[in-house]
Amino acid sequence: QQQVKQSPQSLIVQKGGIPIINCAYENTAFDYFPWYQQFPGKGPALLIAIRPDVSEKKEGRFTISFNKSAKQFSLHIMDSQPGDSATYFCAASKDNAGNMLTFGGGTRLMVKP
Amino acid sequence: DAGVTQSPTHLIKTRGQQVTLRCSPISGHKSVSWYQQVLGQGPQFIFQYYEKEERGRGNFPDRFSARQFPNYSSELNVNALLLGDSALYLCASSWGPQGYQPQHFGDGTRLSIL
C-alpha cells in the first residue's frame, strides 16, 4: 500500500519559474514531513521539513505548504534555477515509530535556462 | 565534519551469493537506518538500529539482516541474492530514533546482480 502519493512524476519549468510538487498521505498518524533532493549518483539530501502544527515553512527559496485536513503537503521552489534540476522526494514518518520514512515516488524536475 | 559514508560504492554479484554493505554515521549520530532504492522509485525502508538494537523493520524477507556496532557503524547483509535485489542501498543516520529527527543519507552502494 502506497501511503504517500506524489505528483507530478516529472516537471519542466523555465528558469525563474515556481515549480510545485504535491504529496498526499493516508496515515493520519504521520507527524513529520521532510522533502529530499537527489542528484544522479548521489544520496537524498534533506531540504526542508515540516510538522503538522504549522501550515507553512520557508527556508531560502524552498517553501512547504501543509494542509492537515486534506492530508496534503506541497513543495514550492521560488526563482528556480537550472541547478535545481534533480529528483525531489516527499516523505513522512511517525514520532512513535522510529526513523522509518515512507517516501513518495519522486518528481523529476528540469529547469530550463 | 564528514557525512554518512558507505562502502563499497559499487558492487557486482551473481545470483545466490551473499553481500555485506557498510555504513559509518555522522559523528555523534546513534541511529542508523537502511533503505533500498530501485531505479526510478523512492527509497524503501529496510531496518533501523539505535544503540545496537533493532528498532524497526520494513517489509523485506529474512534474507536481509543488519547489525550495529558499539561505534554506531552498521552493516547490512543480504543472503541468497536475487536479480530483484539490484538497487541502490542507502544508509541514513540521525541523532536519535524519534520520527522527527532529521535523517541524513550517504551516497549509497550500487548493487548489481547478474
Image (cartoon, coloured by chain):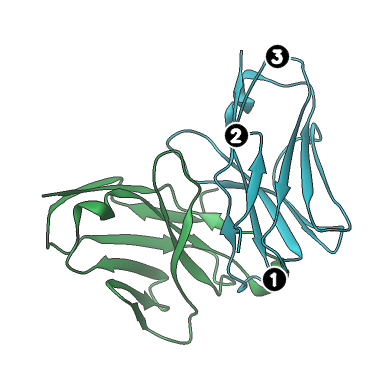
Chain colours: A green, B cyan
Q: Are marks 2 and 3 in contact (CB under 8 Å)?
A: no
- Residue A96 - label: none
Discs 3 and 1 carry the same chain letter: yes
Binning the other alpha carbons within 10 Å of mark 3 as few (below 14), some (14 to 19) or many (20 upward) gives some
**Callout 1: residue from which chain?**
B
Image coords of residue A3 (percent x, y): 52, 55
Disc 3: which residue: B15
Choose mark 3 or mark 1, whichever is in front: 1
Q: Amino acid at mark 3?
A: Arg
Choose mark 2 or mark 3, whichever is in front: 2
Mark 1 or mark 2: whose residue is earlier in sequence: 2
- Residue B9 - label: 2
Disc 1: which residue: B95
**Callout 2: residue from which chain?**
B
Binning the other alpha carbons within 10 Å of mark 2 as few (below 14), some (14 to 19) or many (20 upward) gives some
Image coords of residue B58 (percent x, y): 70, 48
Residue ID at (42%, 86%): A54
Q: Is residue B41 above or below residue B83?
A: below
**Callout 3: residue from which chain?**
B
Name the residue furthest bottom: A53
Image coords of residue B45 (percent x, y): 64, 49
Helix, strand or loop at label 1? It is: loop
Q: Are marks 1 and 2 in contact (CB under 8 Å)?
A: no
Residue ID at (45%, 38%): A41
